[in-house]
Image (cartoon, rainbow, N blue to C red):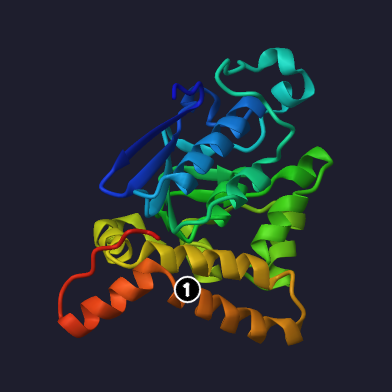
C-alpha cells in the first residue's frame, strides 16, 4: 500500500508506522488520519505482527490537527486507494490491539498527544517538549483529556489542558506519561522480550482491558474468568503448556 503521509514496514514481527509529513510538522489531515487507521487495521489483522512501533520524521513528532485541511478539504491530498471515513484520530489510534511503542524524538503538540497516549510505551528524547495550546486558540483538548486521565490524576491532566504550559520530557516522565528516555533505554531488548511471548494471550489481554471499562464491578470478575477459560482452549495456550513441561521454546501460532 502506498500512503501519502505515513510510511509502514514490517521486520521480525514489528510493524513500524512512521509519520511522514515533516514539512508540515506531521500535522494530521483527514486523509492522514484515514491512512493511520488503515495501517493500524493492517497491523491488527496480520498474524505475524506482534508489536507496533510508531515514530516520526523531522524535528516535530506531531503538531496536532492541520486546521486548514479540516476547515477546507480542498487543501488535503486524497489517497485514491483509501475511501476516507469521518473518523477521529483518537478513534483511529484506539483500534490498536497489540503492544505498541511510541518513539518521540521531537515535540508533541495538541492532538499529537492522541497518538502517543494510546501506545503501551512512550520513549522520548530528553530534549522533547509536550504541550496542549488549544485554550490559547479558544478551543479545548477534550479527546486528549480523556486519554490523559488514563495516565495521570484528573487535576494534573486538567492543569496541562487549562494552563497550556510546555513541559519537558523529564517532567512528562515524572508525571508518568513518558515510560523512559531514548538515551537511557535498550528498546530492542524490550521489543524482544515482548515478541517472544504468546501473541494470542497478549491480544486477549488487550481485548479484555478495553472491555472492562464497559462493565460494572459485579460483571468484571465473571468476565475475566470466562476470558481465561476461553484462552485456555486456544492452540497457543496448549502449546505454551506443552513447551513448559517439555522444557523447550514454544512455537506460537497466534491461534
Kindly indicate the quadrant of the structure image that contains residue 242.
bottom left
Apparent side of residue 71 relative to residue 133 in the rendered image (left or right): right
- Please say if 63 is above or below 222: above
Q: Mark 1 points at which residue?
A: 231
Apparent side of residue 103 relative to residue 209 in the rendered image (left or right): left
> How far across and how far down the image is residue 162, in percent?
77, 56
> How far across and how far down the image is residue 145, in percent?
72, 58
Q: Could you tell me if residue 4 is visible in this image?
A: yes
User: Which residue is at a point 41% across and 49% down the rendered structure image?
Assistant: 52
User: Which residue is at a point 18% across and 70% down the rendered structure image?
Assistant: 249
Apparent side of residue 55 relative to residue 10 in the rendered image (left or right): right
Mark 1, Cα crowd under 10 Å, few <14 / some 14-19 / many 20+, is: some
> Circle 1 — which element?
helix
Return the residue nearer the eye: 57 or 11. 11
Return the residue nearer the eye: 25 or 251. 251
Q: In which quarter of the image is the C terminus?
A: bottom left
Amino acid at each position: 500500500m502506498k500512503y501519502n503521509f505515513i510510511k509502514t514496514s514490517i521486520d521480525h514481527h514489528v510493524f513500524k508506522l512512521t509519520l511522514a509529513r515533516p514539512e508540515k510538522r506531521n500535522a494530521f489531515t483527514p486523509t492522514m488520519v484515514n491512512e493511520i487507521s488503515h495501517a493500524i487495521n493492517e497491523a491488527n489483522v496480520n498474524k505475524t505482527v506482534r508489536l507496533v512501533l510508531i515514530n516520526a520524521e523531522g524535528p516535530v513528532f506531531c503538531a496536532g490537527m492541520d486546521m486548514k485541511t479540516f476547515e477546507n478539504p480542498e487543501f488535503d491530498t486524497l489517497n485514491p486507494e483509501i475511501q476516507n471515513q469521518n473518523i477521529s484520530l483518537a478513534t483511529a489510534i484506539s483500534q490498536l490491539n497489540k503492544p505498541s511503542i511510541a518513539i518521540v524524538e521531537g515535540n508533541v503538540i495538541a492532538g499529537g498527544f492522541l497518538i502517543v497516549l494510546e501506545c503501551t510505551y512512550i520513549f522520548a528524547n530528553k530534549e522533547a517538549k509536550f504541550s496542549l495550546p488549544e485554550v490559547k486558540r479558544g478551543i479545548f483538548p477534550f479527546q486528549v483529556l480523556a486519554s490523559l486521565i488514563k495516565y495521570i490524576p484528573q487535576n494534573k491532566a486538567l492543569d496541562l489542558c487549562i494552563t497550556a504550559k510546555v513541559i519537558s520530557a523529564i517532567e512528562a516522565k515524572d508525571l508518568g506519561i513518558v515510560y523512559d528516555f531514548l538515551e537511557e533505554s535498550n528498546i530492542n531488548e524490550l521489543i524482544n522480550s515482548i515478541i517472544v511471548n504468546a501473541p494470542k494471550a497478549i491480544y486477549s489481554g488487550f481485548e479484555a482491558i478495553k472491555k472492562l471499562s464497559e462493565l460494572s464491578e459485579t460483571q468484571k470478575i465473571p468476565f475475566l474468568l470466562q476470558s481465561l477459560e476461553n484462552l485456555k482452549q486456544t492452540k497457543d495456550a496448549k502449546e505454551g503448556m506443552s513447551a513448559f513441561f517439555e522444557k523447550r521454546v514454544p512455537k506460537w501460532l497466534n491461534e
